[in-house]
Amino acid sequence: MAELKYISGFGNECASEDPRCPGSLPEGQNNPQVCPYNLYAEQLSGSAFTCPRSTNKRSWLYRILPSVSHKPFESIDQGHVTHNWDEVGPDPNQLRWKPFEIPKPSQKKVDFVSGLHTLCGAGDIRSNNGLAVHIFLCNTSMENRCFYNSDGDFLIVPQKGKLLIYTEFGKMLVQPNEICVIQRGMRFSIDVFEETRGYILEVYGVHFELPDLGPIGANGLANPRDFLIPVAWYEDRQVPGGYTVINKYQGKLFAAKQLVSPFNVVAWHGNYTPYKYNLENFMVINSVAFDHADPSIFTVLTAKSVRPGVAIADFVIFPPRWGVADKTFRPPYYHRNCMSEFMGLIRGHYEAKQGGFLPGGGSLHSAMTPHGPDADCFEKASKAKLAPERIADGTMAFMFESSLNLAVTKWGLKTSNCLDENYYKCWEPLKSHFTPNSRKPAEFN
């Protein structure tokens, strides 16, 4: 595979032409009477026309045929995709899932769309407010099939297997320890090369942004220059048997046929694009004296709500870093939170739970449900010599955090058969160390 090229920068106003058609972008206007190379002009709007310039998102696509050239959409099998948050009753317990099982190709060929499984979510798609967490489990590429989401943005986290993603804006190769965002309405198709697994955070009605840095200053965390946007690439391909366009609309799946590949955009310009990011580029900030800074310092992207400082969803990572805090219990503290926290593991071993929480699995700690290090982690960290140490080398854990109360689907609680019924037992060995007559117990010196 030839090395793919990208444009650098988050949210930039970009322009790109396939080099096979130089000058394919119109000069000085968006919608000429006749476009260069006799292309069609089509605008893709990711925000209302009247949004302030700072939040206005749109791109102009110059394509061989407009995307309206298709047969009517018809409802198709929904598989395990749902937005019904009342399938089963609420469960406030700490939940943990073993690695989600990928179907074997010898049993059944499953591509990205047919391998989507909704794990949990909240909110209302029709009012553009909420989110869903999906797991994708697939073993074959999408052949003459593409997908687009009318409901929201997909933040895709591959855990096993790389993804070659064809989009209307060009191609992206996304590997484990990288993420990509396919924004609302953008058509894409995914090729895989092995049994493949990953996580998706879907947000309704809002787009992901870089978090404000406040007193951190101008630099730090995920720097804008490290986000990569594909360059224009097209295929002028007829599909006599029909190309299937799959749409998720109001939480339901529909399909339409057309006679050509949808990846027929010769040139484009705008600021509404797909993009990818390598998590190794995250500039980590941490406490260098004592105590913990809150995990919000590890936020890569945020999808803001209408309440200042409160997110519909944050994407947070726990990357390799130095731990140097003095006189401090260094693992994550015990916590009850007004937010809901879904965690996944791309690789390695999460510091607060060395066993049980495995790559390809997950956990959910709902609003005000207590959580924290297991008993073994607490005992070791309470007695450890506090020298500077590397934390999480070879590991990448992440969190989807939301201000909404997440409901778990029937697939998540039952059908997946991956729920760890013994999760609660990791805290059972915790014991009291209370010494009412000694303020500084010797065993913790």
Image (cartoon, grey):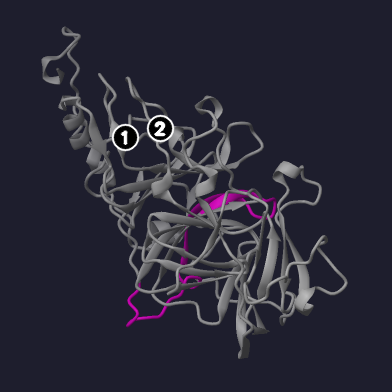
Q: Helix, strand, or loop for circle 1?
A: loop
Q: Quadrant of residue 178?
A: bottom left
Answer left or right for 17 relative to 380: right
Between residue 436 and residue 21, name the one nearer to us.
Answer: 21
Q: Which residue is farthest bottom?
A: 240
Residue 250 locus on image (x, y percent): 65, 61
- Residue positioned 70% across, 60% down in the render: 269
Residue 93 locus on image (x, y percent): 37, 43
- Residue positioned 67% across, 73% down in the render: 266
- Let me know if residue 104 is in the magenta part: yes
Q: Quadrant of residue 235?
A: bottom right
Look at label 1 and name its amino acid: Gly
Looking at the figure, which quarter contains the N terminus? bottom left
Q: Which residues are magenta?
A: 103-132
Which of the labelled discs sits on residue 342, or is there none? none
Answer left or right for 95 relative to 21: left
Answer left or right for 118 relative to 182: left
What residue does disc 2 label? 285
The reply to whether residue 349 is visible in this rendering is yes
Looking at the figure, which quarter contains the C terminus? top left
- Residue positioned 32% across, 83% down in the render: 106
Q: Which residue is farthest right?
A: 33
- Residue positioned 58% across, 31% down in the render: 309
Between residue 54 and residue 428, name the one nearer to us.
Answer: 54
Q: Helix, strand, or loop for circle 2?
A: loop
Count of number-bearing discs: 2
What residue does disc 1 label? 372
**In the image, is residue 282 above or below residue 214?**
below
